[in-house]
Amino acid sequence: MPTIEFENVSKIYDEDTVALDDVSFTIDEGEFVILLGPSGAGKSTMLRVLNGLTEPTEGSVRIGGEELQGNRSGVGMVFQEHYLIESKTAFGNALSGALSRNGLLRSALGMHDDADKRTALEALQTVGLLDEAGQRAESMSGGQKQRVGIARALVQNPEIVLADEPVASLDPKAARDVMRYLKKAATEQDLTTITSLHQVNIAREFGDRFLGIRGGEVIFDGDADDLTMDE
Ligand code: ADP
Ligand code: ADP
């Protein structure tokens, strides 16, 4: 069943910046999709449109058959910059993901219930950081911080996770670690996942399906066997 549908979607930021140019594709429930393309290709724009952070200029975007309108719950985001609160523990940062479920006020007042706390610990377990739950973000490595960022997204109990260049600022070993846990989370929780990357070799190791994007157009849609080094 298609859970994500882009139909003739264009995004034009100003007169001459066409970030997405008549893009159409569908993604089925549970797919682990990697968005590949150089800087400026339109990857972030595609993910931002999907998360309701940016409105398309033309075309239709549907999630679960429903036309996308504004910011949407059920979509978790992971970013290149982790945006963790450095002075908070891994647990506290993961727990902050419950914010979008419970409303700003409750979360700001620190009124997390036991279910939230359990969910946060489960999410840390999923990303292999249960033993580090009480460690402050500031004392963690870049790869660990990104894994906490994934845990925070999981706490929102999403159906879809969008990760925008989640490993771009990591060394290859940490990058693979983060991708491994992202894939594990996606498999365990039946998530539909779109991850943008620009490293073809890392993409190839983890992706099931690849969308190649360049100049705002999808120029490739296939599996690892179809992927050549110059995508
Ligand atoms: P990628 O994530 O692949 O690097 P982006 O979606 O960030 O690509 O950018 C696609 C194009 O849109 C680029 O030409 C970029 O400069 C432009 N762009 C991105 N965001 C904005 C914005 N807020 N305003 C104007 N142009 C933008
Ligand atoms: P703060 O920055 O306010 O100290 P933390 O990020 O340290 O917040 O933790 C947020 C909440 O989670 C607090 O209520 C804290 O007691 C609790 N907590 C922190 N670490 C753990 C842990 N490993 N297991 C269970 N609860 C924890």
Image (cartoon, rainbow, N blue to C red):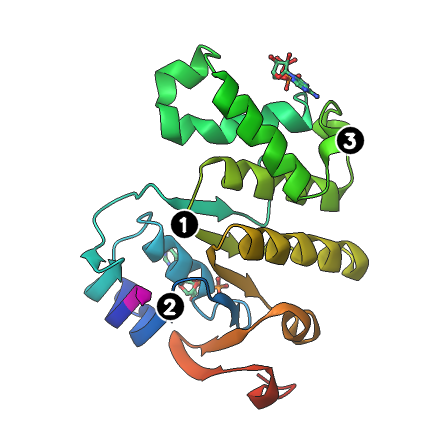
Circle 1 Cα neighbour tier, 10 Å, few/some/many (<14 / 14–19 / ≥20): some
Q: Earlier in the sequence, mark 3 or mark 1?
A: 3
Image check: 179 left or right of 194? right
Is residue 159 shown above or below 56? above
The residue shown at (74%, 55%) is 177
Residue marked by disc 2: 28
> Residue 69, position in %: x, y?
21, 48
Tag 2 near tag 1, CB within 8 Å: no
Distance between the alpha carbons at the discs numbered 3 and 2: 35 Å
Query: How far from the left and from the top, in percent, is residue 105?
Result: 36, 15
Q: Which residue is mark 3?
A: 131
Q: Which of the image's four quarters has the N terminus?
A: bottom left
Query: Which stretch is magenta?
Result: 1-5
Disc 1 marks a residue whose amino acid type is: Glu
> For the stretch drawn in magenta, what is the main secondary structure?
strand
At label 3, counting other C-alpha atoms closer than 10 Å, the crowd grade (few under 14, some 14-19, many 20 or more) is few
The question of residue 70 being in magenta is answered with no
Quadrant (top left/top right/bottom left/bottom right) for the C terminus: bottom right
Q: Amino acid at mark 2?
A: Asp
Q: At x 30% / y 44%, what residue is drawn? A: 72
- Specify whether residue 85 is in view: no
Query: Between disc 3 and disc 2, whose residue precedes?
Result: 2
| In the rendered image, the vertical position of residue 225 relative to residue 182, given as above or below | below
Front residue of 203 and 199:
203
Towards the viewer: 84 or 113:
113
Name the image quarter holding residue 30: bottom left
Q: Which mark is residue 159?
A: 1
The CA distance from mark 3 to mark 1 is 26 Å
Label 2 crowd bin: few (<14), some (14–19), many (20+), radius 10 Å: some
Label located before the other in sequence (2 or 1)? 2
The reply to whether callout 3 and callout 2 are in contact (CB within 8 Å) is: no
Query: Where does ligand 1 appear, by image quarter?
Result: bottom left
